[in-house]
Amino acid sequence: MSSSTIAPTTVMSAKPVVLPAPDRGEDLQVRVSAPATGGDLPVIVFSHGFGWSMNGYAPLADFWAAHGFVVVQPTHLDSRTLGLPADDPRTPRIWRFRVEDLKRVIDELDALEASVPGLRGRLDRGRIAVAGHSWGAQTAGTLLGARVLGADGVPGEDLSDPRVKAGVLLAMPGRGDDLTPFAAENFPFMKPSFDRMTTPALIVAGDRDQSALSTRGPDWFTDPYFLSPGSKSLLTLFEAEHSLGGIAGYEVAETTDESPERVALIQRLTWAYLRSALYPGDTAWQAARSALEEDPHPLGKLQNK
């Protein structure tokens, strides 16, 4: 059966699943969403944008889980639900804690399986992807091989993870050279090097996404595609701002460009991309690309390399 014909299935969701994290100062809380049936399930570890939590991004998590993925959403230390004060000593390293959160989830898949009723023995550890939005996309991209440039311009530590086979990077920040003075001073970790981001990924950018952190226009968010090597795809969404139509949640106040149609396109294309990236020979991505190319009124355009 073609994977593009998979019908949605009942989803079960468990939260909070707590993973001990003594070096973090706060145990890691995650939400796990999975199809109620089936085995050998591929895994998506999702990194939320600044201030969000495991409770966000339901339009994506629900869709992916209903179509055959186990979706694990950690709550990072910057989440509004934790209320970390700005002068907390961990604040300068939150970007590193975020990366470690994603790795901890992968390290602890056995514990996650055991903690969620009905999930034990159903995960395919050979098919793991990461995804993220905004700051979460930068976090996820680090596991794909992106690095942070030091003040001397030298790439920092390699934090890539060979267990991760593919990624989806939604509204991922671009080059640090194009930060505003405020952003450069307050977010020194936003100086990515994409030179070694070799793991296959789909980058999603909105052509109306004007970041207050960048001196450039919306094309800033296409840097992860153009400046990285290897197999990559770029979905540029027409008229889309930073929320990309509303992926952060249903009826979210901070969505400035609400578009259920755009969200539906992102759901279908991200799912199809990860299906085909994790299952060589799967036809879902080719079918989704063809459907977009043949659409007389497309909501976006695709580039591939």
Image (cartoon, rainbow, N blue to C red):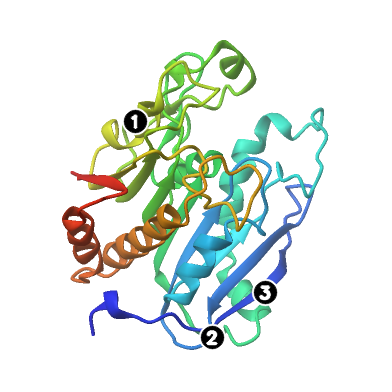
What residue does disc 1 label? 223
- The type of residue carrying mark 2 is Ala
Report the side of 290 relative to 56 (left or right).
Answer: left
Quadrant position of residue 166: bottom left
- The type of residue carrying mark 3 is Ala
Report the side of 103 relative to 283 (left or right).
Answer: right
| Up-down relation of residue 172 to residue 16 (above or below) | above
- The type of residue carrying mark 1 is Asp
Whether residue 233 is visible, yes or no, is no
What residue does disc 3 label? 14
Q: Secondary structure at mark 2?
A: loop
Whether residue 134 is visible, yes or no, is yes
What residue does disc 2 label? 36
Report the side of 292 relative to 263 (left or right).
Answer: left
Residue at figure coordinates x 61%, y 52% from the top left: 101
Q: Quick one: label 3 or label 2, which is nearer the N terminus? A: 3
